[in-house]
């Protein structure tokens, strides 16, 4: 009976999401600009909350608390701090300029299209590269969200992982196919509020049930370096599973979390400058004058949500110290606490926060990939006279293909949401981040530099992750940091070594600096 009531709570939430998709279906299917960018009609709340909800994904309610539960404050705190700082800077520096420049640049409606039009890329080289990068890394990102579906439903209903991944993926596909970017924005607004509400509720009840601050501190005092911001706990593992003796989880002496490691971890924040799911919200804001309001909403949401997520992992270890003994299992701590503290129906709604996190991200990722392939590659490169209806049909077929690929990623064996997300985040951040900043703020940036910067960022991420980092030591840093730095240097050097942009490009740049829409 309890499982049934939990299912009713989750089912009610999912039904609301489908209804929203149906509601916006008729309007959103009128033309590509409406379908892919909601005709730049986002208000400040929709822009802010949907940007943060789509950005954080299932990583916020499962990945981040899981890291905190397994190894303590160290990695979780510095990751969250880097993301918070990155969020604030991105909204403060990039948002308004991109909103203006994307319209000045011949009304670009996707990120690859913006880069192409910004540099007057007549051969669509930049557009093609950016679209392929989006396709690759966002498909991996979608897979990470589908892992969340499998973990959630598999735990609650003891159901088959494969079936649950397919079910969750199908639900997201349905309302994204139907309603386009406006449906995505409105569902993300609801999902973002649900996410932060669920986090705060579980945090409060968790703190009370774990004995308050004093009780939590007492329960954690025997876990070396667990509450040390400049250290990291080291669980004693046997074949990847933490050893437990008489109900007490075993830890080694812990390790230092040095300056280089802190910088590497905080480098997560650099990824924001290249995240299409966030940047596209900047482009969709109704008026440039609304950016400041959106920024304030986004920063407050981010602070509350990430603080709660880290603390839930810490409290979870104090309350259920020996329950979750692998890094992957630790990502279920939010689910365990949610089902223990609330009646089944309420628990279903609270746990829907995890679905909200994953759905708000995967719908955005699927739409961005679809827009890149249908609008940027199919229409701009192969069939310039394609009708709006044909472009949107290509987008829908792309979404279906990405869904199938994402399911494959989810079932491939890597069950750590945190690790899968970190790789895709690094790829997008390094490929697009430095180029976005140079595109918006340095008039001397050239087309060859844009191509070189984008490619070098992606290549370094893959090499560093799969080859260089395995050398250990100083090389075992997060791949986003060296890739971002190298891409930045490449753009700078190649720009100075090549012919400066045309007078027309420079004129557009100057206009974008002061344009108001």
Image (cartoon, rainbow, N blue to C red):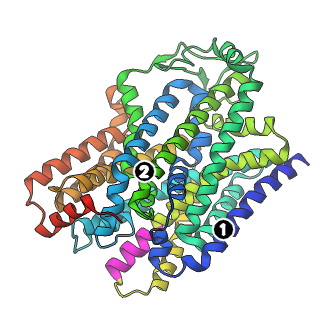
Give the image location of residue 5, x and y in percent: 86, 51
212 is within the stretch colored magenta: no
The residue located at (22%, 74%) in the rendering is 122
| Residues rendered magenta in the picture | 370-382
Residue at position x 33%, y 78% in the image: 380
The residue at 59%/56% (across/down) is: 189
Report the residue marked by disc 2.
Answer: 292
Residue 509 position within the rendered picture, expressed as x and y whole percent measured from the top left: 21, 62
Identify which residue is drawn at 45% across, 80% down: 391
Q: Name the residue that disc number 1 marks.
A: 20
Whole-number angstrom distance, CA of label 2 to CA of label 1: 28 Å
Count residues near mark 2 (Cα–Cα under 10 Å), then give few for <14, some for 14-19, many for 20+: some
Does the rendering let one see residue 424? no
Question: In the figure, is residue 493 to the left or right of 324?
Answer: left
Label number found at residue 346: none
Residue 327 % position (x, y): 60, 33
Residue 184 relative to residue 259: left or right: right
Residue 80 appears in view: yes
């Amino acid at each position: 009976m309890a499982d049934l009531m939990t299912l009713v709570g989750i089912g009610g939430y999912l039904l609301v999401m489908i209804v929203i998709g149906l509601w916006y279906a008729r309007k959103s299917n009128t033309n590509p600009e409406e379908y892919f960018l909601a005709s730049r009609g986002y208000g400040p709340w929709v822009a802010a909350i949907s940007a943060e909800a789509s950005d954080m994904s299932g990583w916020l309610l499962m990945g981040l608390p899981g890291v905190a539960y397994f190894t303590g404050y160290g990695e979780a705190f510095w990751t969250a701090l880097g993301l918070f700082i990155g969020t604030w800077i991105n909204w403060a520096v990039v948002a308004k300029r991109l909103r203006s420049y994307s319209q000045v640049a011949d009304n670009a409606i996707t990120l690859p299209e913006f880069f192409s039009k910004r540099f007057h890329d007549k051969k669509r080289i930049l557009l093609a590269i950016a679209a392929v990068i989006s396709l690759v890394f966002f498909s991996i990102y979608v897979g990470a969200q589908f892992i969340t579906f499998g973990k959630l439903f598999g735990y609650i209903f003891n159901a088959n992982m494969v079936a649950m991944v397919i079910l969750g993926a199908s639900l997201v596909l349905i309302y994204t196919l139907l309603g386009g970017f406006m449906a995505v924005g409105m569902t993300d607004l609801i999902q973002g509020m649900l996410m932060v509400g669920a986090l705060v509720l579980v945090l409060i009840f968790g703190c009370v049930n774990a004995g308050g601050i004093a009780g939590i501190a007492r329960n954690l005092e025997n876990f070396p370096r667990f509450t040390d911001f400049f250290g990291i706990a080291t669980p004693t593992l046997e074949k990847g599973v933490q050893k437990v003796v008489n109900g007490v989880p075993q830890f080694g002496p812990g390790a230092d979390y040095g300056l280089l490691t802190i910088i590497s971890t905080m480098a997560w924040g650099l990824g924001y400058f290249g995240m299409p799911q966030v940047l596209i919200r900047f482009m969709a804001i109704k008026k440039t004058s609304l950016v400041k309001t959106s920024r304030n909403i986004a920063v407050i949401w981010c602070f509350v949500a990430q603080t709660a997520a880290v603390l839930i992992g810490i409290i979870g270890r104090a309350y259920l110290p020996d329950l979750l003994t692998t890094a992957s299992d630790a990502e279920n701590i939010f689910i365990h606490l949610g089902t223990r503290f609330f009646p089944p129906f309420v628990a279903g709604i609270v746990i829907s926060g995890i679905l909200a996190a994953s759905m708000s991200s995967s719908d955005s990722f699927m739409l961005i990939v679809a827009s890149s392939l249908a609008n940027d590659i199919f229409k701009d490169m192969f069939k310039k006279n394609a009708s709006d209806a044909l472009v949107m049909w290509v987008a829908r077929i792309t979404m279906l293909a990405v869904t199938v690929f994402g399911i494959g990623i989810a079932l491939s064996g890597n069950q750590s949401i945190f690790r899968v997300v970190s790789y895709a985040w690094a790829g997008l951040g390094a490929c697009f981040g430095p180029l976005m900043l140079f595109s918006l703020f340095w008039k001397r940036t050239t087309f060859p530099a844009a191509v070189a910067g984008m490619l070098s960022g992606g290549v370094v991420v893959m090499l560093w992750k799969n080859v260089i980092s395995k050398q250990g030591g100083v090389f075992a840093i997060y791949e986003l940091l060296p890739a971002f730095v190298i891409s930045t240097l490449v753009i700078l050097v190649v720009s100075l070594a090549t012919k400066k942009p045309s007078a027309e490009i420079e004129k557009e740049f100057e206009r974008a600096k002061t344009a108001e829409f």
